[in-house]
Image (tube, helix red, strand yellow):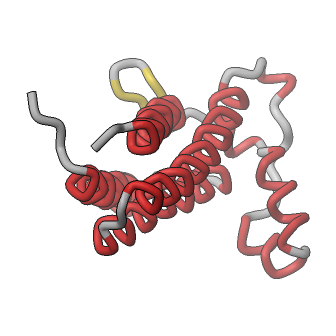
Amino acid sequence: MTLPSPRLTNVGLFLFMLAGMAVALFLQHHDHLEPCPLCIFQRVSLMGVGLIALIAALHNPAALGRRLYAGLAMLAALAGVGVAGRHVWLQHLPPDEVPSCGPGLDYWMETFPFQEVIQKVLRGSGECAKVDWTLLGFSLPEWTLLMFTGLTVVAVWQIVRKN
């Protein structure tokens, strides 16, 4: 079995990001599932992985450059794992332990310094704990956690692969 080239793998990662964002935007605009702050951060992580992969595919570097790009993609994917993991954790809290809903992300961005916004978002809130959508019994953040875990595995494979 012939493995795809590093360039083709990066193109695949970029296309996967486009598909993931298309699904997210479809669910937002067609099914009216408004993203919570943690969802938005997961989208940013996914776009980070995809854009790094696109740059790597266009650049098509030698082994060291491929590993550097893959390392950056791995960091973006791990950020997604962290945010999605936090989101899943919030969704599984008992109702009496769920944080109260706060103001929207737009308000926070206008009111607080960026570092404080990040801290507030990662704490999560009531709207992040709500399960609005499931597929095969898994919530959207659970699917997203699985996706980011897979992206991390692909990035690690890009780092350690021989060709």
Q: Report if residue 133 is visible in the image.
A: no
What residue sits 35% from the left and 52% below the top?
20
The percent coordinates of residue 40 (x first, y second) are: 59, 59
Q: In the figure, 156 relative to 14: above or below?
A: above
Furthest toward the left, the residue is 1
What residue sits 41% from the left and 57% below the top?
66
Which quarter of the figure has residue 10?
bottom left
The percent coordinates of residue 41 (x first, y second) are: 62, 57
The percent coordinates of residue 45 (x first, y second) are: 55, 56
Left or right position of 94 against 64? right
Q: Report if residue 139 is visible in the image.
A: yes
Left or right position of 8 against 53? left
Furthest toward the bottom, the residue is 110
Which quarter of the figure has residue 124?
top right
Front-most of residues 16 and 10: 10
Front-most of residues 55 and 107: 55
Front-most of residues 79 and 37: 79
Marks counted in the figure total 0
Q: Quadrant of the C terminus?
A: top left
Front-most of residues 85 and 137: 85
Q: Quadrant of the N terminus?
A: top left
What residue sits 33% from the left and 73% below the top?
59
What residue sits 41% from the left and 18% below the top?
137
The percent coordinates of residue 117 (x first, y second) are: 83, 65
